[in-house]
Image (tube, rainbow, N blue to C red):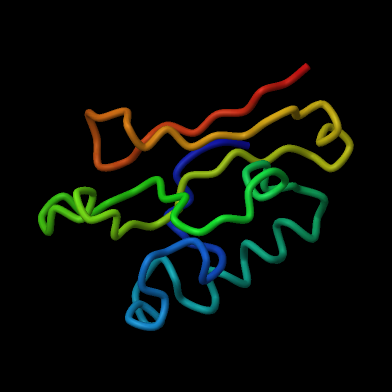
Amino acid sequence: VCGDLNTAHKEIDLARPKANEKTSGFLPQEREWMDKFISHGWVDTLRMFNQEPEQYTYWDQMSRARERNVGWRIDYFFVSESYAGQVKGAHVFPDVMGSDHCPVGIDIG
């Protein structure tokens, strides 16, 4: 499952979690939905390999947030637990321009 889920799952997934506690995309019920999704056997591939902050995939264009890396990680690549062993890497490509989002990808093999 890959795409824009419009939700930052954990505090590590956005630049300003405290300032966005009541903002759509970081509401408790949205984050709980992601917890439930993961509990049903789905694996966040990026977090399999990278626990570092600032792995953002979206930046507001109006505030020029990308220039300051004030972003959100709302684009994901999930795989089933049974397939997770085939994933050899997961990536965010913040230098790819053309949108307010950047691509995400995985290496399989």
Write down the quadrant of residue 106 in the picture. Answer: top right
Q: Position of residue 43 (x, y in %)?
A: 74, 47
From the viewer's side, name the closer residue of 73 and 29: 73
**Of 36 and 109, the residue lying toward us:** 109
Image location of residue 71, percent across then percent down: 33, 57
Seen in the image, is 14 located left or right of residue 109? left
Compared with 109, 21 (above or below) is below
Tag count: 0
> Residue 93 falls in which quadrant of the image?
top left
Horizontal side, residue 73 vs residue 49: left or right? left
* Quadrant where the N terminus is found in the figure: top right
Residue at 67%, 31% in the rendered image: 89
* Quadrant placement of the C terminus: top right
Image position of 69 with respect to 28: above or below: above
Q: Say above or below: 85 vs 23.
A: above
Task: Give the residue at x 82% y 50%.
Answer: 41
Residue farthest to the left, as pictured:
62
Choose top left, top right, bottom left or bottom right for residue 60.
bottom left
- Image position, residue 70 (x, y; %): 29, 60
**Most foreground residue, 82 or 70:** 70
Q: Residue at x 56, y 69 (%)?
A: 31
76, above or below 36, in the image: above
88 with respect to 59 (left or right): right
**Farthest right residue in view:** 82
Question: Residue 9 at x, y = what percent?
Answer: 55, 63
